[in-house]
Image (tube, grey):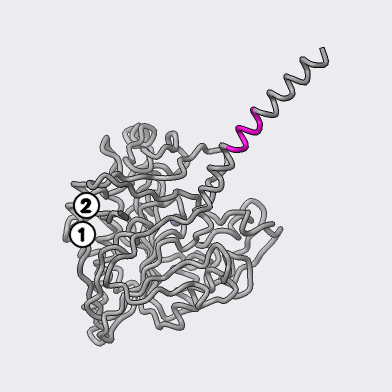
């Protein structure tokens, strides 16, 4: 009898050990930073957020800002993704710029993982895919982590009971976890919580480098009638944003514009728009893996964007005036192409509207080719 219990206990402990090893490897793997292609010869400097807030040195959020200095004085812009790390279209837009762009006049700055901490975990209990992989023509693959919209509690814990942030947003009750949301704490606090300190680094980068405009890439669920395919701009950026959106519409991209809410406290277009001279813009594409009615959160859903749930609800007329939704869904190459086209049109509009601050780029892939052939055709091989 005694021996049988011993055997059972050993079996249970062995099973627990196997589960710990398997899940531990997944957990530790998620903490490993993605490898980016940085062989673009047009990169002129690699800065870090800790250059603008030393409190980030040695932290998970001390991320790179890639500089593309044309050598011709002119406008300066920051294009970034990864504020919310499950909004993969914005991150892959920044990757596309990093790998391909050349700045012909002025200076462009690219940041891929604005809140790197968010990539190191997924939201509990959702069974969400944590990576997306692309098979390249040379037989190699490129993988990118998928995270969640807030910083990892491993990096920032505990959340306070109450917090009034620097942009006047009151965080309390069920909203308190937003203290780990990069897009609720602008312009941030130099020695504050990790997420606030990251916000402050971006604020100080804008001030120090004299950035003329920013483009903060996002995605939203398919029920977000007002957000999807919409450029949100601070009131100071209305002429710039409306010119860029109009040019997109002329080119048959069904995009629209919205003005930043006066009480959108802590969001980049409000918190940075009010506190810096930069013209602040934020763009959202449709990600069917987000929203309240998402299907099973597989890698395929993030990549293909085909959602039975949202298709049925759109056909039932539940989201009038929202973005188109049909059997073809919203694939990642289309969402990335929309981000690329929108941000490139803002650059073009800025160059036209501010002739004393020229800003010209070249080298981006053709948006229609990207949509037709997928990101497999545009991502660079790491081999
Ligand atoms: Zn977002």
Q: Main secondary structure of the magenta part?
A: helix
Q: Residue furthest front?
A: 3
Residues drawn in magenta: 15-21
Q: Earlier in the sequence, mark 1 or mark 2?
A: 1
> Picture quarter containing residue 5?
top right
Q: In the rendered image of this protein, does residue 188 appear above or below residue 27? A: below
Read off the residue under disc 2.
370
Q: In the rendered image of this protein, does residue 73 appear above or below residue 28? A: below
Image-based side of 32 in relation to 214, left or right: right
Residue 194 forms part of the magenta stretch:
no
Image-based side of 156 in relation to 82, left or right: right
- Residue at coordinates 40% horizontally, 77% vertically from top-left? 278
> Picture quarter containing residue 316?
top left
Give SS at disc 2: helix
What x and y, as percent, mark residue 361? 23, 72
- Quadrant, the C terminus: bottom left
- Residue at coordinates 51% horizontally, 78% vertically from top-left? 52
- Quadrant, the N terminus: top right
Residue 16 forms part of the magenta stretch:
yes
Q: Residues within 10 Å of mark 2 (few under 14, many from 20)?
A: some
Marks 1/2 in contact by CB < 8 Å: the verdict is: yes
What x and y, as percent, mark residue 116? 50, 59
What x and y, as percent, mark residue 35? 40, 57
Q: Nearer the viewer, residue 223 or 12?
A: 12
- Residue at coordinates 31% horizontally, 75% vertically from top-left? 68
Query: Label 1 to label 2, Cα distance in Å?
Result: 7 Å
Quadrant of the rendered image holding ligand 1: bottom left
Q: Residue furthest top?
A: 1
Give SS at disc 1: loop
Q: Which mark is residue 365?
A: 1
Q: Residues within 10 Å of mark 1 (few under 14, many from 20)?
A: some
């Amino acid at each position: 009898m005694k021996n049988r219990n011993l055997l059972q206990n050993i079996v249970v402990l062995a099973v627990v050990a196997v589960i710990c090893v398997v899940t531990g490897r997944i957990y530790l793997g998620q903490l490993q930073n993605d490898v980016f292609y940085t062989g673009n010869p047009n990169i002129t400097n690699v800065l870090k957020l800790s250059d603008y807030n030393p409190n980030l040195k040695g932290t998970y959020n001390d991320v790179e800002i890639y500089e593309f200095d044309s050598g011709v004085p002119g406008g300066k812009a920051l294009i970034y993704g990864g504020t919310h790390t499950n909004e993969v279209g914005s991150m892959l837009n920044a990757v596309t710029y990093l790998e391909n762009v050349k700045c012909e006049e002025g200076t462009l700055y690219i940041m891929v993982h604005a809140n790197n901490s968010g990539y190191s975990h997924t939201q509990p209990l959702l069974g969400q895919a944590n990576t997306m992989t692309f098979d390249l023509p040379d037989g190699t693959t490129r993988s990118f982590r998928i995270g969640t919209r807030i910083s990892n509690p491993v990096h920032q814990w505990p959340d306070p009971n109450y917090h009034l942030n620097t942009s006047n947003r009151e965080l309390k009750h069920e909203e308190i976890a937003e203290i780990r949301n990069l897009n609720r704490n602008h312009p941030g606090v130099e020695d504050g919580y990790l997420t606030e300190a990251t916000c402050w680094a971006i604020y100080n980068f804008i001030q120090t480098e004299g950035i003329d405009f920013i483009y903060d890439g996002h995605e939203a669920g398919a029920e977000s009638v007002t957000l999807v395919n919409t450029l949100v701009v601070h009131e100071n950026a209305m002429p710039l944003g409306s010119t860029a959106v109009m040019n997109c519409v002329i080119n048959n991209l069904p995009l629209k514009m919205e003005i930043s809410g006066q009480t959108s406290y802590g969001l980049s277009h409000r918190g940075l728009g009010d506190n810096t001279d930069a013209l602040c813009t934020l763009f959202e594409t449709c990600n069917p893996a987000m929203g309240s009615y998402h299907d099973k959160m597989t890698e395929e859903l993030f990549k293909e964007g085909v959602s039975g749930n949202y298709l049925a609800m759109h056909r039932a007329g539940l989201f009038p005036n929202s973005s188109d939704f049909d059997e073809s869904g919203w694939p990642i190459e289309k969402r990335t192409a929309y981000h690329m086209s929108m941000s490139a049109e803002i650059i073009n509009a800025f160059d036209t509207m501010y002739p004393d601050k020229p800003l010209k780029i070249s080298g981006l892939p053709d948006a229609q080719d990207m949509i037709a052939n997928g990101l497999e055709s545009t991502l660079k091989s790491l081999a």
